[in-house]
Image (tube, coloured by chain):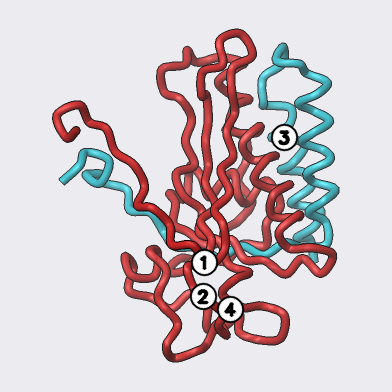
Chain colours: A cyan, B red
Amino acid sequence: MWPIYQQETIAKPFVGRIPQTFADDMDTIDAYLAESRGTRDARPLVELLVRRRKETTAP
Amino acid sequence: MQQRALYHEPARPPYGVEDVHIITLGQADGRILGYVGLSGSYDQVPLALDAPDRPRLTTETAHQVDLLRRYAGPGLDTHRVFEVKRFLRNLDMERGTQASLVPWHIVLGFGRSLLALGGPQRRVLAVGDAKEQVAIRHLLLMGLDLEVVGAPRPACPGPS
């Protein structure tokens, strides 16, 4: 068996749909990558997306 | 060929839906830094997602689960389903700023591709399997409406 299959953590199957907010999220990621031009790491982007996910999943 | 560890995907039949390959290249040397593939259906004609004769996706076969039946309905068929393959970053990259950004370049190409494939009605499904703390975390953060089978609905993870 190839080594890539010899892993302790088992992958889980998923199905993803595109919500209404998806295009805005892509614009946000696009803008961050363009602005950072490789000089800032991904942490601020991740923090921004975490906040956005909490907003969009809030009851 | 086997000794040189050269492999290739099986040749696709001349029908169905074409695959999409998203690649991030290094500006300086053109090396491949990241990759994800969207594998399209081999069905000659689009089938309903609950069709009894629908060929199972690789992920469904591997996990012995029907992932698509619950999404059956108008506007979605097997030509609207893409399997996500090999969400990878070049592990030879040094840890740091560039390495942290590569997955997000891949995510951006992946997301833009889904928007184009789904059209104005966003009629497209991305299906696959992934580790919860790695690729699934990216899929969740990028904003996909995600159902993870065999696990509770994922909560929003904090940055690590």
Label 3, secondary structure: give it. helix
Q: Is residue A21 above or below residue B73?
A: above
* For discs 1 and 4, the disc positioned in front in the rendered view: 1
> How many numbered markers are drawn?
4
Chain where mark 3 sits: A
- The residue sitting at the bottom extreme is B52
Q: Which residue is mark 4?
A: B46
Point out the image quarter for the C terminus of chain B. Answer: top right
Q: Is residue B109 above or below residue B61?
A: above
Residue B83's x, y, as percent? 50, 59
Q: Which residue is mark 2?
A: B44
Spatial distance from mark 3 to mark 2, Cα to Cα?
Answer: 43 Å
Residue B32's x, y, as percent? 51, 24
Which numbered tag is attached to residue A41?
none
Three-letter code for the amino acid on which mark 4 is drawn: Pro
Three-letter code for the amino acid on which mark 1 is drawn: Tyr
* For discs 2 and 4, the disc positioned in front in the rendered view: 2
Q: Could you tell me which residue is drawn at 57 percent across and 63 percent down? A: B17
Spatial distance from mark 1 to mark 4, Cα to Cα?
Answer: 11 Å
Q: Are marks 4 and 3 on the same chain?
A: no
Q: Which residue is mark 1?
A: B15
How would you rate the neighbour count of disc 1 (Cα within 10 Å): few for under 14, some for 14-19, many for 20 or more? Answer: few
Residue A2's x, y, as percent? 20, 42
